Image (spheres, rainbow, N blue to C red):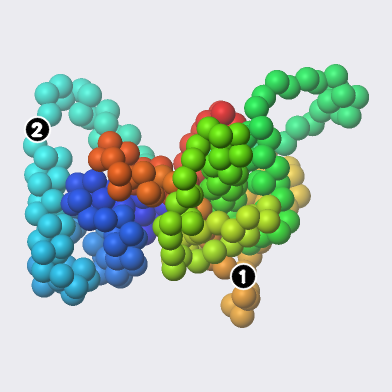
Amino acid sequence: MSTAQVPDLLRFLSQDAKIPLATAMGRVIDLQKSRLVTPEQISKAELKTLQDIFKEEKLAKQVFNAAKRVSKKRAAPVQGSTSSQKKAKGSDRGENVTPFETECSLSLPASSAAEDELLNVVLLTNRAPLVLAFAVCILRYTMPEQPISSRLSLAQAVVSANSRSKAVSLGIASGDSAEHEGWGEGQPVVKVLGREIKVLKRWDYNPREGQPTKEHCTEKNAILPGALDDILGQPISGDSTNTPPLWGIDLEALRSSQESTHRGASKVIYRSAWSQQEATE
């Protein structure tokens, strides 16, 4: 399953099929093993297969009918052939991007400025981007096996959790947090900056998949010793106890997605497929 498919599958199950997100998250691995990761694939599957995965005939039919509905809508002709072709080309590019290319596209720039130059630099920003940048840098040493996409994801998850705590302390937010209410219970946990973060393990995701024979990401990274390991994560040996690549889970968004049909799974998992500018906003 590609990097983008897990959030897309969860979005389909929670928004289109109206499956509770907690239930959907528990079925992702089974769907992946059955090679049912898109509405099109699910719509062509045997209903019995879905019943075995979801354990309930009602849920299986719900997912099956939603998959048929979504697939039919996507197959319908759209006005404006030019825009359709452009969209199709964009989709093809996204589907053909390898994990190696995805990770390299997220590589962070390295400054060549001298200390004297940096002393004269003044940045006006709020707290969140600083915590995000600090967490990403810390994870480079505390979880060196994690690729840059996972480090950005985990860093953003801890920023969200810290923001919730800060909002409560300032009286901006009230009530129990999603974690205290039991959201994400049973999910694996890692510690980032001393805070426990619920995660999804990205099984079968290899950030080095698609790596060319001549090791390079971009021209700037090619001249930096060890740049690839910083981006792709330190290689994991077969008997290593290190965890696979991870996604950080936003428990507050998970709870909100069940309270409003307008806010689905798109923000629940902190994906890192954004531009460098978005990463610092």
Q: Is residue 234 left or right of residue 164?
A: right
Q: Is residue 16 visible?
A: yes
Which quadrant would residue 220 be assigned to in this image?
top right
Q: Is residue 200 above or below residue 56?
A: above
Query: Which residue lies at the image location 70% right of the left edge and 42% below the top edge?
Result: 134
Query: Which residue lies at the image location 26% right of the left edge and 50% below the top edge?
Result: 14
Residue 93's label in the rendered image is none
Crowdedness of circle 1 by 10 Å Cα count: few (<14), some, many (20+)? few
Query: Which residue lies at the image location 63% right of the left edge and 76% below the top edge?
Result: 240
Total marks placed = 2
Q: Is residue 77 left or right of residue 157?
A: left
Q: Earlier in the sequence, mark 2 or mark 1?
A: 2
**Which amino acid type corresponds to the residue marked 2 in the rendered image?**
Pro
Q: Horizontal and vertical percent for residue 209?
A: 49, 58
Q: Which residue is mark 2?
A: 77
Q: Which residue is mark 1?
A: 242
Query: Which residue lies at the image location 11% right of the left edge and 72% below the top edge?
Result: 48
Q: Is residue 211 visible?
A: no
**Which amino acid type corresponds to the residue marked 1 in the rendered image?**
Asn
